[in-house]
Image (cartoon, coloured by chain):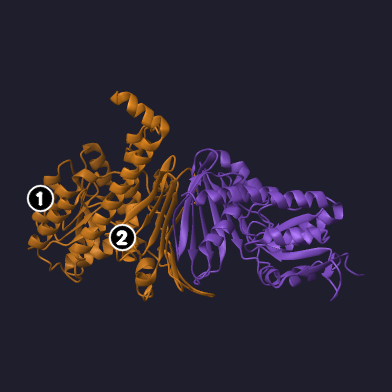
Amino acid sequence: MPSQTQPAGTPLGVGILGAGPVTQAIHLPALARLRDILEVRHIMDVDESVAASVAARVGATSSSSMDALLGDDTVDIVAICSPHQFHAEQVIAACRAGKKAVLCEKPFAMNADEAARISEVSAETGVPIVVGAMHTFDPGWLAAEGHWEDLPATAHTIRSSIVLPPNARFEDFATEIVTRPAMGTPDYADIDVIKAMMQGGIMGLAIHDLPLVRRFTPDFKDIQVLQARHVQPFGYAISLRTPTRTIELRAAMNNTWQPEWSFEAIADHSALRIDFTPSYVQAGSATATFSRGTETTTLGPYSHNGYEGEWRELAELARGSKQPPSAQTLIDDLTFALAIADATVDSVAADHHRRPGAIAATAGASA
Amino acid sequence: MSATYSVTATPGAEEAGAVALAVASLPATFGPAADGAATPDVAAIAGGPGWTAEVLDAIESGSRGVLVVNPVPEDTARLSAAAEAAGTAVVLDLRWASNPALVSQDGGPDAREAFRSALGTAAMLDSVATAAPGTDPQRLLGEHLSALLEVTGTLEAVSLLQSGTSGYTFSGRLANGAPMSAHGVLTAARPAGVDIRLYTADGGVSVRLPEPAAAWPAEVRVTGPHGGLLLPTLYESAHRTAWRRLKEHLTAGTRPDDLARFARLTDLYATFADT
């Protein structure tokens, strides 16, 4: 069981596994605003030169091994910003290393079994885990939560719409990136490429807002995909329904300069719209607007965004001044996202095979 | 100076189309027909089921112009032929598609032109129609589709994904193969209207169409690498625009192509019955 008696006046130590663009352009700038409570002490990346370069910016130790970071006693909170497939193993290792709290970038696992194992380890070790679904920590969302009354029970239509330029535009507003990953040119005629892009669209982009969608979808376990369409160069148009909800998910990542990131929940007599600020930049919180006929109420914007909100939450959890989130909530959020991702991939594959050309090709191959 | 053309309106047309207000805003051209007068110059008819038969009656009784408020999809082949033969101008006053921001009446910039310039690089079209609870979703869908066709020109492979008491969703493809999704939402929480958003490789076009109950201006925004452009706002309702179009045709002696264009909507709408 980790100690939770850090003196209130001493910053907690942060260690980060993975020093890619998200660490450089999101977490370090957010932590720079919280120097009075959090201090970056260790940066690990499999590329030793990247780890050293990024660590030097914040005066932290660098390493290229997870064990070195987890063995660093100055690290109280571990942030896992590595590729998705390493998340589960690293979350479990951080819990077992006796750290005070763990932040895992979304998704925190790639299947329900991994999620259950993480939950068990978290319960066994008492280490609280926060999943980096930053919008759930956005002050605009949290303010809406305090005002939405019965909307989660009465909403019949839910929309998430995400329009963003390539990440590099906002990364460059936030920091000076070292070693940006190279982007290839996808072959849109290859169904496996499309399936991978749809899977990535759900687990990498839609997943930011799926916990929000789930809050307004009590029958989330009974979800059906009505359409799943890939949007070039990267994005999706997905229509879902449950017995009581219509859910529309849209995303387009193009070369626009104008981002738009909105979430809406609409009932017969009230509606909520939340406009989020883009990731990477410190542009304050979302703005939440409630509409009831001709009456509208706006909450926000507030001075910080959901990433900073996450770190504030982690500091409180590590100090033991706040209760950790329910493990079941994290598991339900994950299984909801996985169910949508799987059904979406199945849907685009089925559409592909229904095309006359695809059927002919398949028939020819089997003959 | 008295009005040039006398007008009568059925109660349904008056209620749905605010005919008296529109006529009063074009006082040199239109005026109410005197009580007990013979055939009016212009008949305003509500576009509920069977509207084509009512328009045929108006044509046969000698009206020079007919304005139909919010017509539902219906076969217009016989009506087109009759209007052509009689030289009657039939103008359709469509809830959203008649908004002057979509198609300029005087050569100014409009949404149709903005969309046409952008459709070649379209990545996705997303549209939401909002109307009050209790609205017939099928009727809303027709009005929504009509507004979409006004800016896209054509839609391919349309199919209805779901329809119920709280709205509907349908999908299709733009001419370049990009996905189109549209849904209707029944709620009293927000003003009724239609949003249409076209996303392109480097920006897009968005349109927000208000109800024609007042002269709220639509918003048309074009976004590109240069920045964003708001097209001039037009404080004219869809109703008045339709009446102004009728005036132009009556004055010039020309025939509008409303019925021919509406036939495309009727054909497309019929495909929903198969999905």
Disc 1, SS = loop
Q: Is residue B106 above or below residue B63?
A: above
Pick whichever, A91 or B49, lies toward us.
B49
Q: Nearer the viewer, mark 2 or mark 1?
A: 2
Q: What residue is drawn where x is 8% and y is 54%?
A: A96
x and y percentages locating residue B239 in the rendered image: 70, 64
Q: Chain of mark 2?
A: A
Residue A80, relative to residue B166: is it above or below? above
Residue at x 41%, y 67% (from the top left corner): A302
Q: Amino acid at mark 2?
A: Pro
> Which mark sits nearer the N-terminus, 2 or 1?
1
Residue A48: name its quadrant.
top left
Give residue A95's position: percent from left, percent from top. 12, 56
Rendered image: mark on residue B266: none
Q: Along the horizontal axis of the image, is B203 left or right of A220?
A: right
Which chain did the renderer colour purple? Answer: B
Q: Colour of chain A?
A: orange
Q: Position of residue A91 (x, y in %)?
A: 16, 52
User: Closest to the observer: A309 or B156?
Assistant: B156
Q: Secondary structure at mark 2?
A: helix
Which labelled disc corresponds to residue A211? 2
In this view of the protein, can residue A110 be seen by the observer? yes
B144 over B125 or under it: above or below: below
Q: Residue at x 27, y 56 (%)?
A: A336
The quarter in which the N terminus of chain B is drawn is bottom right
Instruction: Provide the chain ID for the residue under circle 1.
Output: A
Q: Report x, y in % for residue A120.
A: 10, 58
**Label 2 CA crowd tier, 10 Å (few <14, some 14–19, many 20+):** many
